Amino acid sequence: MYNDNPTLKFGKEKTIEEDKQGDVFFKEQVANKEDKDLKKFYIESYGCQMNFSDSEIVASILAEANYASTRNMEEADLILINTCSIREKAEQTVRKRLRIFDKLKKKRPGTLVGVLGCMAERLKAKLLEQEKLVDLVLGPDAYRDLPKLIATAEDGTKGINVHLSREETYADINPVRLGSNGVSAFVTIMRGCDNMCSFCVVPFTRGRERSRDTFSVVAECTELYQRGFKEVTLLGQNVDSYKWENPESKETVDFADLLELTAQIAPDLRVRFSTSHPKDITDKVLHNMAKYENICKYIHLPVQSGNSEVLKRMNRTYDREWYMDKVRAIRRIIPDCAISSDIIAGFCGETEEQHQETLSMIEFAQYSMSYMFFYSERPGTLAARKYEDDIPLEIKKRRLQEVIRLQNQISFEINRKDQGRIFKVLVEKESKKSADDLCGRNSQNKMIIFPREDVQVGTYVYVKVQEFTQATLKGVLVSEEEYKNSL
């Protein structure tokens, strides 16, 4: 994941950007068809995959209100930015973008600017009243109100709704697949979070956990497959907490059940999911992953720290040994499963010895990749109220660099072991470096580049790995028979 290039591009419209401290944010500029008779909206999304999924819900709501999307912000009647509050860097980036949008408003009077998502809920008063950069502020549970609030803003009154719901799941809205490659799609299965990790703002910005009904999730995935999509990613702040009770039969569906139902839609529909919480992922989930070839053998299992005392201050509700036992279970039940992680360096009170335990955890778990950050205090969190942010910035940066360096070494060695192996790959897009190459991911979520030949995007191919870096694999096409013989 991390290399010397600060910007890793995904196609022409989506990038993952990384600052020198290791903070990462996601940016997406998307466009669908343009219609001269409709008003136009422009949207950028920052943060987690849930934000991208939410932007697709917003696009669907706006389409019903006679808006068409545009990739040119200068012609937009409505500019929206879907925001993230998880780290200070992401908020700084959003503020820079809002100042750019403000300049466009002055050139094009009547243009409305709106802030959506987590930052909207947290900084509503400041954005509307003090800085006066926006006309609309909507929290993650208020998107249905967008057309009404647009009308309010057009009349000169600021539109705001940051109410957090205990019921809203948008289950009845068919998302517009913004900037889609037609191959992979996100499907939100639940919203909110009840975990209350001391460093995290999500429970305050997205509210309590609630699960979509199983029927609507399976129906959405089925409809995507019928439209030609070959991969769905089931999304939630903590997918393993998914639980829905059928009001008629009173049967309870947990995440392992939902995963199996989705896998049964079609054998060539790949199923991924994100994110898992170590305390909640069950052996039942792992056994279903092992049972179905089309459930990808990849788990994002954030550890955050490798030290039990730090984990206790983080309110992660597991300790070092619990997490290690979970990793052992994954390796036992799904031997070929790749595991990735989130890691925070320099959390409140972290000693040098505790930092070393995080490094040893990375060695033990052998993560294929990690999202790595130094601690950034977020206002309103338990950690901000209870603990002193007492690790000097230079020490945070040094510890983060040690984490990144070790993870890069492990990623490189893991990819070295894949040299000579043959993988089934879902073709996603053209390689960013050469029009003569295509690329796609294997079941373990590794990107593999291979010659285009006569291959079509959205099909499965078999690739023998010949070259590797810490981030990607490169190989040549082989036959299905050769792949099967290699198993």
Image: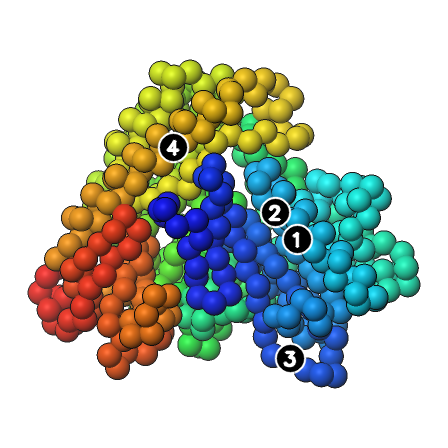
Question: Which residue matches tag 3?
Answer: 34
Question: Which residue matches tag 4?
Answer: 401
Of labels 4 and 2, earlier in sequence is 2
Q: Nearer the viewer, mark 4 or mark 3?
A: 4
For marks 3 and 2, give the CA distance: 28 Å
Give the residue displayed 71% in from the left and 44% down from the top.
Answer: 121
Color scheme of the displayed model: rainbow
For marks 1 and 2, give the CA distance: 6 Å
**Under tag 3, what secondary structure?**
loop
Of labels 4 and 3, earlier in sequence is 3
For marks 4 and 3, give the CA distance: 45 Å
Where's residue 220, x and y in %?
51, 67
Judge by depth and name the residue closer to the eye, 360 or 326. 360
Q: Nearer the viewer, mark 3 or mark 2?
A: 2
Question: Which residue matches tag 1?
Answer: 97
For marks 1 and 4, give the CA distance: 28 Å
Quarter occupied by residue 279 = top left
Where's residue 485, x and y in %?
8, 65
Question: Which residue matches tag 2?
Answer: 93
> Callout 3: 10 Å neighbours few (<14), some, many (20+)?
some
